[in-house]
Amino acid sequence: QVQLVESGGGLVQPGGSLRLSCAASGSIFSANAMYWYRQAPGKQREYLALIMKGGSTTYADSVTGRFTISRDNTKNTVYLQMNSLKPEDTAVYYCRMLATHGDYWGQGTQVTVSS
């Protein structure tokens, strides 16, 4: 069983930056893919970014050019660097690990973008 714990959320002003972390209790090296999603109040969960085992990445149009996903296999951690944040980025952010042995989600971390 893998546990994912997100951290790094908080309150930030528009135009600011945050870096989210997703720490896995086990190795992420075997993960086929690691994802970031978010869910704003009253909205469906939204895909944001994906990093494959080989390191290739893809992004949702809404965050392309502003968010960057990365992984550190030595620390079993995935990151989401978020720049140029907007009020509409306010949401709970979740990481997800898709592996041959299961599909795992973290509990989420709140990001609030407000002046």
Image: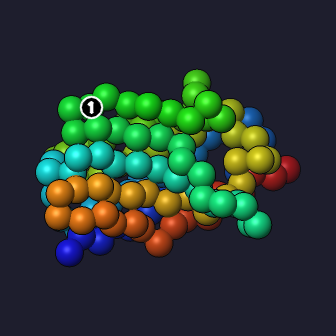
Percent across and percent down for residue 51 are 34, 38
Q: Quadrant of residue 61?
A: top right
The structure residue drawn at horizontal position 54% and vertical position 65%, both measured from the top left corner, is 109
- According to the image, what is the colour scheme of the structure? rainbow
Q: Amino acid at mark 1?
A: Gly
Q: Quadrant of the N terminus?
A: bottom left
The structure residue drawn at horizontal position 74% and vertical position 66%, both measured from the top left corner, is 41
Residue closest to the far right: 115
Percent across and percent down for residue 71 are 30, 42
| 1 w.r.t. 17: above or below | below
Classify residue 28 as left or right of residue 105. left
The structure residue drawn at horizontal position 75% and vertical position 41%, both measured from the top left corner, is 86
Considering the numbered disc 1 on the image, is that residue within a helix, a strand or a loop?
loop
| Residue bearing mark 1 | 55
The structure residue drawn at horizontal position 15% and vertical position 48%, both measured from the top left corner, is 29
Depth check: give the residue in front, 80 or 56: 56
Residue closest to the far top: 65
**Residue count near mark 1 (Cα–Cα under 10 Å), binned few <14, some 14–19, many ≥20:** few
Q: Quadrant of residue 90?
A: bottom right
Classify residue 103 as left or right of residue 20. left
The answer to whether one can see residue 95 in this image is yes
The answer to whether one can see residue 13 in this image is no
Percent across and percent down for residue 78 are 34, 48
